[in-house]
Image (spheres, rainbow, N blue to C red):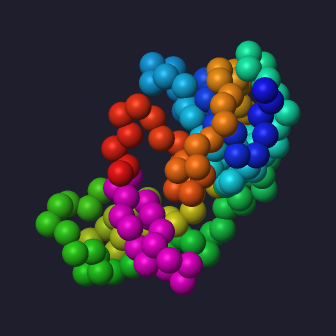
Amino acid sequence: MQVAKNKVISIDYTLTDAQGAELDSSQGRGPFAYIHGIGNIIPGLEAALEGKSKGDQVNAVIPPENAYGARDEKLVQDLPRSQFDTDQEIQVGMQFQAMSEGGPRVVTVVSVDADNVTIDANHPLAGVTLHFDVTVKEIREATGDELSHGHVHGPDDQHH
């Protein structure tokens, strides 16, 4: 069986940046499972895995336009502290959910002063060329429920 649309694919992966710094990995968490061909993973990695078989190892370099897009400096904004309804001290690195024209979006605090909070609504990996080292562990048919729900169900599925 090969990696194709509507198949459940399980992969082990390590994600690094161009300098080799590890950004993410499935190591210690077990394989990552997703439904292929329905937008569950970034387009560049999905294309790199298409047609592969169980046991295949794939090294893929994914440019930003096939991953999380280019950085958009218009998504970095200064807001008055008074707009943050929280009892917590606002610190760099905190994330909040904000409403945007496109719906809810996660924003990250990048700086704080006495009057303003600077937020960044770019995805943390926007503008980054991603380097994936992937091993295809399993391939199976997706169930009807998985396809209708748009995600993989596991033995201890807590979604339903």
Specify the farthest residue to the top: 55
Task: Tell me: 151 left or right of 62.
Answer: left
- Closer to the camera, 121 or 133? 133
User: Horizontal and vertical percent for residue 98?
Assistant: 40, 73
Task: Tell me: 110 left or right of 85.
Answer: right
User: Horizontal and vertical percent for residue 58?
Assistant: 78, 25
The N terminus, quarter of image: top right
Residue at position x 82%, y 37% from top? 50
Specify the farthest residue to the front: 144
Q: Is residue 120 above or below residue 133?
A: below
User: Horizontal and vertical percent for residue 128?
Assistant: 69, 47
Helix, strand or loop for the magenta stretch, by majority: strand
Specify the farthest residue to the left: 87
Is residue 48 in view? no
Residue at position x 52%, y 56% from top? 149
Q: Is residue 95 magenta?
A: yes
Q: Quadrant of residue 12?
A: top right
Q: Quadrant of residue 114?
A: bottom left
Query: What span is colored magenta in the figure?
Result: 93-108
- Closer to the camera, 79 or 86? 86
Is residue 133 in view? yes
Residue at position x 37%, y 58% from top? 95
